[in-house]
């Protein structure tokens, strides 16, 4: 069993970085293959044992463990865990509530029901009274068999909905919740709740400590969209499939695992970020930031966004940072950071730098985009740069042609900006974040960072890294939900890419297009990690975050 979040480590799969994330269909296929390779009911027994072991570790002093079991095999896992816990925790009350009758459940689950009956498991109607923080609730209602809009066969959704509401209820000293496979109601592939199953956050739901034990495979929905809040700390047991470097009992002669749908991003190598002693400012590359429409144009000053990007590039390790403000009013006084060199946009040579374009660019950025799209060898396109491209087919063509000219581009849209580029709506993007990012990457032949909880990084298949083209970033938290942090990411990404290019990381084996993806993976990880490690006593702001990265440039 592995603890995956909140301590992401490099996985052992493939070339040793990141954990594989599988689709629901592939998980099911693997499940059938594993079940067939084992004696009947064995897989569910393994699942129940894994749940029971984790339950004991999470709540060793529990006096009550309450398990809410649904009508399918997820409920069967819950019943199997109950049978195990009744033996492993002899002084605790092990109680189950089931939404279905035994005979209506699948065969594996019926066998587990019988084992729970033979153990000293008690059947109860709902959550027992008097549970507290040292007790444990287990959510075994709906796993990967969740279907939007009900569950067919004429059965009612009401029993599941009632127990789900009880599991989500919280008060002072609430018992922690351990979800089996995925939090009930959440789609394990997309990270979105099924219609009608979204928790009412106003009632303080989901505030209790939450854990999820993912069985067999990890799925992307646990790490993106609503998944992080729904599932809490993620654990993984592959039940012997050999997908993680578990020391559990392996299943012999298994077929090749399916191709992962995405990968969980992992920490960058700190040595790669260190500079050689004999370095000079050219060793770390130049970043040119262009953006920041001025107050004079439309009465909306957005120069702060461009300053934030430039500041993040500076502290993120760029050798030199130029800032081309789109502010037509004459500069007042000296620049707040004398290290950042101000430029008129017409005086900036776009060919000689990693360009970060669009932060606070307003409408003014449109004018500069044709030249930048034609010339910049490495381009991070953010915010109003993306909006301008979304509104203009000629810019889209220029953008899509860049990759064939070996010019690298990383787009950093938030869901609304991605929706504009894809000519769809934000809900459609959020409903399927991985597919949305991958589609945009293919359409525009760029690396894409789709921001939000569990940012998705995707690149076109033509410049995949070791056959990988999609990742979900594991770091970051709600501290980043404040104005300007996106500008900081764009600047940090520019600095990371400039450094990689200047240090010769581009090679025949690692052409410059792939370098953009690598820079995106590293920058997104560090940006989120800075928020994760932020000292609670320090005020957090985008400016403070931008300055933080200076401490990370290793000498
Ligand atoms: N078969 C096995 O031996 C194994 C099963 N496993 C478990 O099995 C789960 C998948 O099992 P199932 O395919 O039976 O699926 P689930 O148990 O997740 O759910 C299926 C049941 O829920 C009902 N349902 C679906 N959507 C609903 C909705 N919106 N409202 C109310 N009811 C709804 C369906 O009618 C069906 O009865 C995994 O998540 C995992 O927990 C794994 O542990 C691996 C081993």
Image (spheres, rainbow, N blue to C red):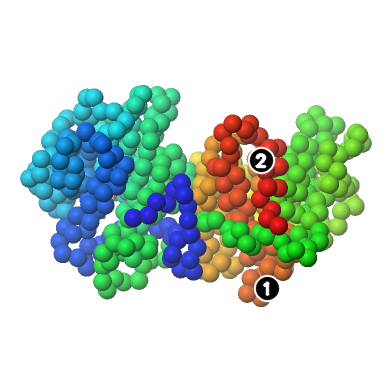
Left or right position of 329 against 543:
right
Residue placed most toward the observer, 4 or 158: 4
Q: With respect to residue 244, does 538 lie above or below?
A: above
Residue placed most toward the observer, 514 or 284: 284
Q: Which mark is residue 545?
A: 2
Q: Quadrant of the N terminus?
A: bottom left
Left or right position of 44 against 298:
left
Badge 2: residue crowd in 10 Å (few <14, some 14–19, many ≥20): many
Location of residue 442 by image quarter:
bottom right
Judged from the image, the secondary structure of the residue bearing numbered disc 1 is loop
Q: With respect to residue 128, does 273 lie above or below?
A: below
Tag in front: 2 or 1:
2
- Residue at 29% x, 39% y is 59
Q: With respect to residue 501, does 187 lie above or below?
A: above
Image location (x, y in percent) of residue 73: 22, 49
Q: Is residue 402 visible?
A: no
- Residue at 14% x, 53% y is 107
Q: Which mark is residue 333?
A: none
Image location (x, y in percent) of residue 261: 44, 59
Image location (x, y in percent) of residue 413: 62, 47
Q: Quadrant of the C terminus?
A: bottom right
Judged from the image, the secondary structure of the residue bearing numbered disc 2 is helix
- Residue at 22% x, 40% y is 69
- Residue at 41% x, 41% y is 232
Q: Is residue 227 visible?
A: yes
Q: Which residue is mark 1?
A: 507
How far apart are the two marked residues, 2 and 1, measured between alpha carbons?
32 Å
Location of residue 464 by image quarter:
bottom right
């Amino acid at each position: 069993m592995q603890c995956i979040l909140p301590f992401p480590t490099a996985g052992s799969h493939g070339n040793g970085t990141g954990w594989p994330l599988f689709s629901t269909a592939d998980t099911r296929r693997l499940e059938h293959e594993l079940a067939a390779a084992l004696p009947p009911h064995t897989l569910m027994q393994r699942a129940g044992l894994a749940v029971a072991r984790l339950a004991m570790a999470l709540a060793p002093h529990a006096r009550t463990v309450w398990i809410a079991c649904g009508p399918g095999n997820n409920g069967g896992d819950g019943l199997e865990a109950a049978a195990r816990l009744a033996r492993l925790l002899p002084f605790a009350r092990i109680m189950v509530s089931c939404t279905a009758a035994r005979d209506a459940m699948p065969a594996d689950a019926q066998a587990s029901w019988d084992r729970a009956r033979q153990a000293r498991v008690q059947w109860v109607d709902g959550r027992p009274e008097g549970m507290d923080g040292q007790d444990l609730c287990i959510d075994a209602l709906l796993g990967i068999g969740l279907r939007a809009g009900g569950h067919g066969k004429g059965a009612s959704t009401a029993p599941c909905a009632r127990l789900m509401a009880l599991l989500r209820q919280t008060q002072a000293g609430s018992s922690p919740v351990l979800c089996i496979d995925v939090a009930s109601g959440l789609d394990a592939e997309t990270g979105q709740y099924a219609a009608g199953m979204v928790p009412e956050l106003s009632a303080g739901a989901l505030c209790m400590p939450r854990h999820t034990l993912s069985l067999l495979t990890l799925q992307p929905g646990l790490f993106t969209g609503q998944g992080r809040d729904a599932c809490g700390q993620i654990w993984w047991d592959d039940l012997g499939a050999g997908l993680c470097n578990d020391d559990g009992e392996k299943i012999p002669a298994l077929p090749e695992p399916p191709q992962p749908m995405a990968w969980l991003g992992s920490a960058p190598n700190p040595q790669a970020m260190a500079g050689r002693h004999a370095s000079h400012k050219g060793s770390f590359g130049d970043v040119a930031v262009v953006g920041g429409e001025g107050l004079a144009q439309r009465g909306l000053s957005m120069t702060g966004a461009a300053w934030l990007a430039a500041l993040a590039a500076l502290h993120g390790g760029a050798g030199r940072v130029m800032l081309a403000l789109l502010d037509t009013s004459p500069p007042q006084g000296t620049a707040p950071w004398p290290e950042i060199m101000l430029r008129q946009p017409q005086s900036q040579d776009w060919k000689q730098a990693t360009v970060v374009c669009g932060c606070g660019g307003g409408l003014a950025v449109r004018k500069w985009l044709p030249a930048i799209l034609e010339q910049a060898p490495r381009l991070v396109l953010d915010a109003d740069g993306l909006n301008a491209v979304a509104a203009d087919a000629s810019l889209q063509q220029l953008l899509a042609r860049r990759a064939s000219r070996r010019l690298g581009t990383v787009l950093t849209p938030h869901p609304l900006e991605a929706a504009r580029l894809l000519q769809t709506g934000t809900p459609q993007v959020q409903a399927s974040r991985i597919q949305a990012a991958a589609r945009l990457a293919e359409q525009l032949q760029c690396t894409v960072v789709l921001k939000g909880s569990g940012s998705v990084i995707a690149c076109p298949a033509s410049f995949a890294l070791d056959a990988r083209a999609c990742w979900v970033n594991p770091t970051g938290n709600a501290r980043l939900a404040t104005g300007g942090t996106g500008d900081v990411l764009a600047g940090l990404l520019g600095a990371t890419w400039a450094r990689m290019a200047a240090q010769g990381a581009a090679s025949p084996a690692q052409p410059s297009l792939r370098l953009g993806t690598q820079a995106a993976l590293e920058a997104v990880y560090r940006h989120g990690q800075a928020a994760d490690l932020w000292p609670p006593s320090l005020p957090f702001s985008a400016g403070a975050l931008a300055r933080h990265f200076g401490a990370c440039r290793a000498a």
